[in-house]
Amino acid sequence: MNKWSGWALTAGALALSASVHAAPPTPAMLSNACAGCHGTHGGSAGPSMPSLASQSKTAIVEAMKKFKSGERPSTVMGRLSKGYTDADFVAMGEFFSKQKFHPTSQAVDAAKAKRGASLQEANCSRCHLDEGKDGKDDTPVMASQWLPYLQMQMGLYHSGARKMPEKMAEKVKPLSAQDVEALLHFYASQK
């Protein structure tokens, strides 16, 4: 073995040793990658991105799995989710579920929001708890999400591009387009 081969072997062994003993990324480190679109600590600053802060861990994990499998349509998330494991999704879900609720300031139609309040109580309150500020099981937090984001997602549900959960379909499909729009204004108005 010549001198350079010995150096190469030693350097390779050190690099391998360092990677074996490197600590795995923390949930906060994994979640930092989301901040560019979903804001620091999950408080979205853009109208087409949802806030992840205070979402249930289950809702985030299920959403990420659906992005990764292609079940849930996306422009970016499908590609990004492929870089993470199921354990990473759980860690991110845990991180965002512990972040403080992030209220948005946005203009909504007050009359629609008022009508949406009664529709929410009659149709959605069994799963979207506390006026959408909490969710039952894997039901996402709807309160204070950006109105354009809510409208885009509802459009995906109605077009069939995104599968609507059965319980949701039972309640939403009988509603008129005006009723659904009122519901979205209600959720967007919640603080």
Image (cartoon, rainbow, N blue to C red):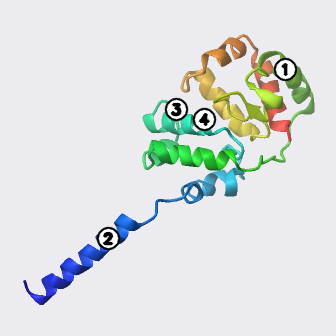
Image-based side of 39 in relation to 190, left or right: left
- Secondary structure beneath disc 2? helix
- The three-letter amino acid code for the residue at tag 1 is Glu
- Secondary structure beneath disc 4? helix
Q: CA distance from mark 3 to mark 4?
A: 16 Å
Please tell me in which quadrant of the rendered image residue 141 appears.
Answer: top right
Q: Measuring 85% from the left and 37% from the top, which residue is drawn there?
A: 190
- Residue tagged 1: 121
- The three-letter amino acid code for the residue at tag 4 is Thr
Instruction: Answer few, some or many: residues within 10 Å of disc 4's Cα (few below 14, many 20 plus, some between 14 and 19).
Output: some
**Precedes in sequence: disc 4 or disc 1:** 4
Task: Point out the frontmost of discs 1 and 2.
Answer: 2
Image-based side of 109 in relation to 40, left or right: right
Q: CA distance from mark 2 to mark 4?
A: 36 Å
- Secondary structure beneath disc 3? loop
Instruction: Answer few, some or many: residues within 10 Å of disc 2's Cα (few below 14, many 20 plus, some between 14 and 19).
Output: few
- Residue tagged 4: 58
